[in-house]
Image (cartoon, grey):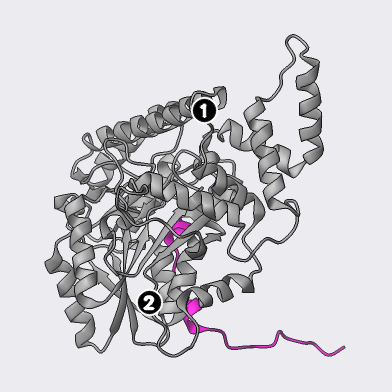
Amino acid sequence: MPSFSAAETTVNPNIIEMEYAVRGPIPARAAEMKKQGRRVILCNIGNPQALGQLPITHYRQILSLVEDPGRLVRERQLRKLEAPGMPVMEEEILDQAQYILDQMETGMGAYTESRGPAFVREAIARFIDRRDGVAPGEGGVPANPEHIFLTNGASEGVKYILEMLISGPQDGIMIPIPQYPLYSAAIKKLGGVQVNYYPDEEADWNLETAMLEEALVRARSGGVQVKAIVVINPGNPTGAVLNERSQREVIEFAAKHGLAILADEVYQENIYDGSFTSFARLIGSDPIPLFSLHSISKGFYGECGHRGGYLEVRNAPRVSNSRHSFIDLLVKQASVSLCSNTVGQVLTYLMVTPPPEGSAVYQQLQTEKKQILAELYDKALTIKHAFSKMEGMRCYGRIGALYLFPRMEQLPAGSSDYDYCLNLLEETGICTVNGQGFGQKSGTHHLRIAFLPPRNMLNEVLPEWIAFHNRYVNQ
């Protein structure tokens, strides 16, 4: 019989060149080690439930009811029996599940409206207004439910916007360095230009107008048409929280140069020693295009696998080459996928719709929330304290998000942060991501660690890391 070889084809070269470090070679090596039965502690990605964080109780109770409506009937029957000692769900849980099912109309297994069910988008708008202190007669710009899109995680919202803005090979997007590699990968895939700007690490990763202007001038001198600036607050990978002055610098810069702002605010609940200020609140009535993102994956919810989130659009730019509006085209994009997944939609609704204050469900939610956030902060402080025992390890910025991004000021000659992280994994089982995977200033070396492992695991492994580090840097 004749032999056949696989046919060859050309593929998009941008995908070949695309990189995504948090799932890159170091995590791949960790996966191999795990198959070999070796201890691996996955700190390379913000995936809380993979490291033992429990889901919020009433979220999962409601999901169980809306996915199995027959159980809702049975739970109501159990409440009527009032048998002593019989565990039953709170009335608020049953009522909220019934409300969700009534509003979904066609159940959890059917497609919804492309931009998401109206009742969820309306709840998101109310949440944004509460968060930003917007109330009738008290000033502020209310959120518009028609300009809110439910997405499969915040990442899908990022892709929607970048796909709209990058229309040619000279279209540029400003991104902070270091950055979450979703942005560099998406820009590369779409054939656009990544325009780097560099927050000041030693000033706790805050911003100055001069650094933004420098990046813009450099890009424009190369013929790049810069269209938007990405801001991640709290930061990923740095975990740093921008001060309000830095946020206003970005807003004034965007207004001056006619840029849109893409505000990645998925870690807005992960601020441990202060409060969150959104870009929407600071922009107010100024006509600056703003795309804001939030997600159920982070905060204290940790529902990464359920892929829920939203994109809010304010002051959408006019589309110069079409009779369609920007919002119309976003609806068209969402329609291509028909809709986001319905479980993610429900969890997004629950994220923005807390139980009635004073109810037993509310009290339980507050208890679980405080415990999760307190434990995260405690683990961050524990790891940061360990850095103080490692020669040449410096960690700047307020603690936010789920990450620390220390700088290694002392490495052996010829060694890189990739070498360090790979050796750290092999010797201790701690899987981190080297700084170069996120971008960094030339000549500097970093790593990102997610402070998610259980406290007892940290207590066991941190002394091993300290010993490894001080031995490694003194080779």
| Residue 206 x/y as whole percent | 19, 54
How crowded pointer 2 is (Cα within 10 Å; few <14, some 14-19, many 20+) is rated as some
**34 in the magenta segment:** no
The residue most toward the top is 84
| Residue 472 x/y as whole percent | 28, 45
Instruction: Report the residue at 29% width, 69% height from top.
Output: 288
**12 in the magenta segment:** yes
The residue most toward the right is 1
| Residue 77 x/y as whole percent | 81, 25
Which quadrant holds the N terminus? bottom right
The magenta region covers 1-26
Q: What residue is disc 1 on? A: 362
Q: What residue is disc 2 on? A: 317
Give the CA distance from mark 1 to mark 2. 40 Å
Q: Nearer the viewer, residue 96 or 395?
A: 96
Any part of residue 28 in sight: no
Most frequent secondary structure within the magenta stretch: loop
Q: Is residue 114 left or right of residue 465?
A: right
What's the amino acid at mark 1? Tyr
Q: Is residue 440 above or below residue 138?
A: below
